[in-house]
Image: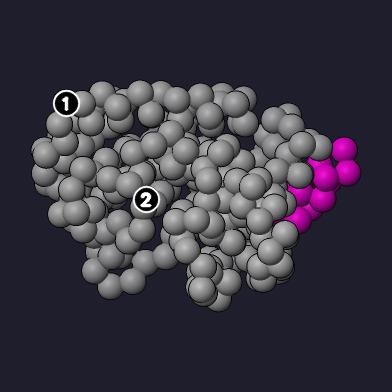
Amino acid sequence: MVLFFTGCSFVNKLKVLILSASVNNMKEIALNVYIDEDMNITQQKHLLVQILQAKEYVSDIYGETISTPMIYACSTKECTKTLGIGARAYNMYNHIALSPKALSVALISHEWSHAELYKRVGGFFNWRKIPAWFDEGLAVVVSKNEPRHNKRSWQKIQDEHIPYPSIDELVTTHQWIDATHKYQEGLNNDEIVVTYAVAGNIVSEWYKKVGTKGLNELFEDIKNGSSFDEAYKKHDKL
């Protein structure tokens, strides 16, 4: 999920980065995995299985995982509010926060993809070069069959002539947020999310041509000073 911070939500998200898990009343159940104290044993076991599968999803696209994100998982609304989770989940650089609705392999792998990309391009300043549509679209590809923005969702958009944004409307974070609101009007968010389906389709078609090798070469080019457009177009022609 793209980062967008306002008011209390921003303050709570900063708590995830700055304060220890114990300050947020969370306990560690595995390396870098923290949960609220109300999560039962069955939920904990399920979560750990989903995380292992999510890592495999990320490795399938990136070749391997080099990021080790801190994962904060909630089983209650109170925990969700404390961590500033406005929707299902968010990633903040190398930190993933999950609501009770996000304890699935698709959503965990989606957020992990953001952490992996951030790591591979070399951190914040290079990450800022990446357009929102590519970061989010790649996360959609990684998450495979998340039903709200998989291939069937994209086909539905085409078949039913649902309006969708152009790639130029999805470059910056603010554009992404604006487009999500504009093109989601009248649609059920639990059924389809237009911006993610569009971005996922674009990146999926590009990835089919370049594969894992081309993807990681793009990251290296950006890390070494290339603009995103230069790197993307270079590997689009391979």
The tag earlier along the polypeptide, 1 or 2, is: 1
On the question of residue 26 being in view, the answer is no
47 sits left or right of 197 in the view: left
Identify residue for label 2: 89
Q: Is residue 209 left or right of residue 147?
A: right
The stretch in magenta equals 226-238
Q: State the separation of the CA atoms marked 1 and 2.
A: 21 Å
In the image: residue 57, left or right of residue 48: right
Residue 140, image x and y in percent? 57, 45
Can you identify the residue that label 1 sits on?
A: 41
Compared with 88, 8 (above or below) is below
Q: Nearer the viewer, residue 150 or 18?
A: 150
Q: Residue at x 26, y 50 (%)?
A: 16
Residue density around tag 2, few if under 14, some if 14–19, many if 20 or more, within 10 Å: many
Residue 56, visible in the rendered structure: yes
Q: Amino acid at mark 1?
A: Ile
Q: Which mark is residue 170?
A: none
- In percent of the image, x 27 and y 45: which residue is there? 100
Q: Residue 198: x, y in percent?
A: 66, 57
Mark 1 Cα-neighbour bin, 10 Å: few <14, some 14–19, many ≥20? few
Magenta stretch: includes residue 123: no
- Give the residue drawn at x 66%, y 56%: 156
Q: Is residue 193 above or below residue 214?
A: below
In terms of secondary structure, where does tag 1 sit? helix
- Front residue of 73/130: it is 73
Q: Estimate the x, y position of residue 154 in percent, counting from the top left.
A: 66, 53
Q: Residue at x 30, y 27 (%)?
A: 46
Q: Quadrant of the C terminus?
A: top right
Q: Main secondary structure of the magenta part?
A: helix
